[in-house]
Image: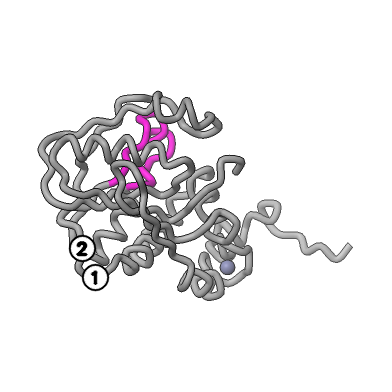
């Protein structure tokens, strides 16, 4: 049949980190073609709510979408270094002069954080913070335990409960891994604004469509 038998039913190259999580090409966990495809893909849009501007690295249709799915659904913490690297790439597109005084992330629901063993927004914020020379701080607390995936847009915003952990000052860069409707990010930004943030800019590495 021409199909090469691999140990662990074909999982071996992946388990050993020898297959690109973006396109499946053998050789490395994140290949240079997938990395290059991101260089010009970052978008930046003005928003109407508490998030003044939203910066997104990539759309769901490309290699980043596959990478993020594998990272979160696996879950596969060994891909966190690559994800943090994407955070650095996204942060590089912040207009000069708009560097934030604080970097934080949209907190995950508690059950999710426990079952994954990592908090996706925090991993991305780590890479963003390294690029900016600003140490990410946990400014927000998640009060709901529900997962947003698969809910319709009208339920998302009302069910998400996020509060601030204290006073916030200056301009805040609010990081998440994925934005779908942007509901969690808006709720988080509202909490930051109420606690004193002057301006909130959002940053995510992936824009996911509602159907995805
Ligand atoms: Zn690739």
- Quick check: is the Cβ at mark 1 less than 8 Å away from ligand 1? no
Q: Which mark is residue 135?
A: none
For label 2, the residue is 99
Question: At 38% from the left edge and 37% from the top edge, which residue is drawn?
Answer: 184
State whether residue 97 is above or below residue 152. Answer: below
The reply to whether dot 2 and dot 1 touch (C-beta < 8 Å) is yes
Residue 101 percent location from the top left of the image: 15, 56
Q: Which mark is residue 96?
A: 1
- Quick check: is the Cβ at mark 2 less than 8 Å away from ligand 1? no
What is the C-alpha distance between the residues marked 2 and 1?
A: 7 Å
Residue 115 percent location from the top left of the image: 43, 34
Give the quadrant of the N terminus: bottom right
Q: Which residues are magenta?
A: 105-121
Q: Is residue 115 magenta?
A: yes
Q: Is residue 112 magenta?
A: yes
State whether residue 73 is above or below residue 165. Answer: below
**Ligand 1 placement by image quarter:** bottom right
Question: At 16% from the left edge and 47% from the top edge, which residue is drawn?
Answer: 198
Whether residue 142 sits left or right of residue 75 in the image: it is left
State whether residue 151 is above or below residue 197. Answer: above
Residue 93 percent location from the top left of the image: 34, 68
Residue that lies at the very extreme toward the right in this rendered image? 1
Whether residue 91 sits left or right of residue 59 in the image: it is left
Q: How has the structure been colored for display?
A: one colour
Residue 86 percent location from the top left of the image: 40, 63
**143 vs 180, nearest the viewer:** 180
**19 vs 183, nearest the viewer:** 183
Give the quadrant of the C terminus: top right
């Amino acid at each position: 049949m021409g199909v090469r038998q691999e140990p662990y039913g074909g999982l071996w190259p992946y388990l050993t980190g020898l297959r690109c999580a973006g396109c499946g090409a053998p050789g490395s966990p994140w290949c240079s073609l997938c990395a290059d495809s991101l260089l010009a893909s970052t978008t930046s849009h003005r928003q109407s709510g508490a998030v003044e501007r939203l910066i997104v690295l990539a759309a769901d249709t490309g290699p980043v979408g596959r990478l993020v799915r594998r990272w979160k659904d696996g879950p596969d913490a060994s891909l966190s270094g690559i994800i943090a690297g994407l955070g650095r790439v996204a942060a590089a597109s912040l207009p000069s002069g708009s560097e934030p005084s604080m970097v934080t992330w949209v907190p995950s629901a508690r059950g999710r954080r426990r079952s994954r063993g990592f908090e996706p927004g925090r991993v991305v914020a780590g890479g963003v913070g390294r690029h900016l020379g600003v140490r990410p701080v946990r400014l927000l607390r998640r009060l709901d335990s529900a997962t947003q995936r698969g809910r319709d847009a009208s339920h998302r915003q009302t069910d998400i409960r996020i509060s601030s952990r204290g006073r916030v000052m200056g301009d805040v860069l609010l990081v998440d891994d994925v934005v779908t409707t942007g509901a969690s990010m808006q709720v988080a930004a509202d909490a930051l604004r109420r606690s004193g943030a002057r301006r909130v800019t959002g940053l995510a590495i992936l824009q996911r469509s509602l159907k995805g």
